[in-house]
Image (cartoon, rainbow, N blue to C red):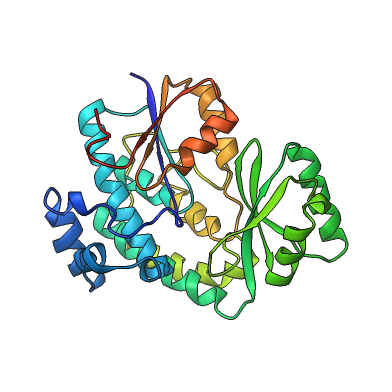
Amino acid sequence: MSWVGMFPGQGSQEPGMGKELLEKYPELLIDIFDDSLGWSLKDIINNGDAESIKKTNIAQPYIFAISYCYGLEVINNYGKPSALIGHSLGEYTALALSGFFDYTDALKVISVRGEAMQASVENSNTGMAAVLTTDLEATLKEIEALNSQDIEVWISNYNDASQIVISSTIENLEYLKSNSKALGARRVIPLEVAGAFHSKIVSPAKPELAAAFEEVTLKDGSIPVYMNVDANLASKETLKERLVDQIDNSVLFYDQILKIDDEIKPSEWIHIGPGNVTAGMVKKSISSKEIRVINSLESIT
């Protein structure tokens, strides 16, 4: 079977997710996690509520660790995938499973990434919103027009054929929510996030992430991974630079989907980890494909 694994980013978390994995992967989810980050994922899984796991410094390591373990299960059951991709944070899961860096290093870097991103948006009065459109090209032109009028709107994610995610000030996003036609869109839906991620607002986080990567040994990956910043294949030589650039650049997930479909033509796309968001993106972009969601051990058949 030719298949592609896809891993979700922040926003896919929910209380108690991955609890079934604690007994199966105690070394990864308890021992290594506690030693690497100094706090207990087991406690968060058993006692964390929706508000506590929404914090970037908690959510990112939590989602990564759970998705990584489900990824191991899927690969053990289905064999080696043709390629892997991840949405923002999910890219780290894809790269770790491929072997570009190990699980422990990934946890440490993700912890620095989450803390630095959170610090950069504190008191920024910015946010993000999903833009649902039937004419993506027209919507992109409307955003260009707003920017030419000094109304700053950044495109954080190109998700699929009918959805992008924008970032701006809270005031601008509230206006666009009530006036979606200004973007040629059906709906503009503000997201519950701490600030304008994947925009220039989080650029101050880049030096800290770059410094964290200086402590990481990179290796050649064993599975092809297509990258968010340019939709091209990951390479050991450019990996650090591209992951640092990912912080304040658009996530080109739509481009990644189309490129993989063109170059690999996989028979199946599998969302691996909490939620099902990447499966929806593939369905809207190339609806004829076989798509599966694996977010529990039971769903692995």
* Quadrant assignment for the N terminus: top left
Q: Quadrant of residue 266?
A: top left
Taking the spot 42% from the left edge, 66% from the top edge, the residue there is 54
**Vertical placement of residue 99 versus 64, above or below:** above
In the foreground, 55 or 141: 55
Taking the spot 62% from the left edge, 66% from the top edge, the residue there is 127
Q: Is residue 14 left or right of residue 239?
A: left
Q: Is residue 195 left or right of residue 116?
A: right
**Vertical placement of residue 239 versus 136, above or below:** below
Q: Quadrant of residue 213?
A: bottom left
What percent of the width, then of the height, locates residue 12? Answer: 42, 53
Taking the spot 47% from the left edge, 22% from the top edge, the residue there is 264
What percent of the width, then of the height, locates residue 224? Answer: 40, 34
Seen from this angle, which residue lies furthest front?
178
Taking the spot 42% from the left edge, 19% from the top edge, the residue there is 267
**Vertical placement of residue 166 versus 255, above or below:** below
Q: Quadrant of residue 45?
A: bottom left
Q: Is residue 211 visible?
A: no
What percent of the width, then of the height, locates residue 260? Answer: 51, 28
What percent of the width, then of the height, locates residue 158? Answer: 62, 45
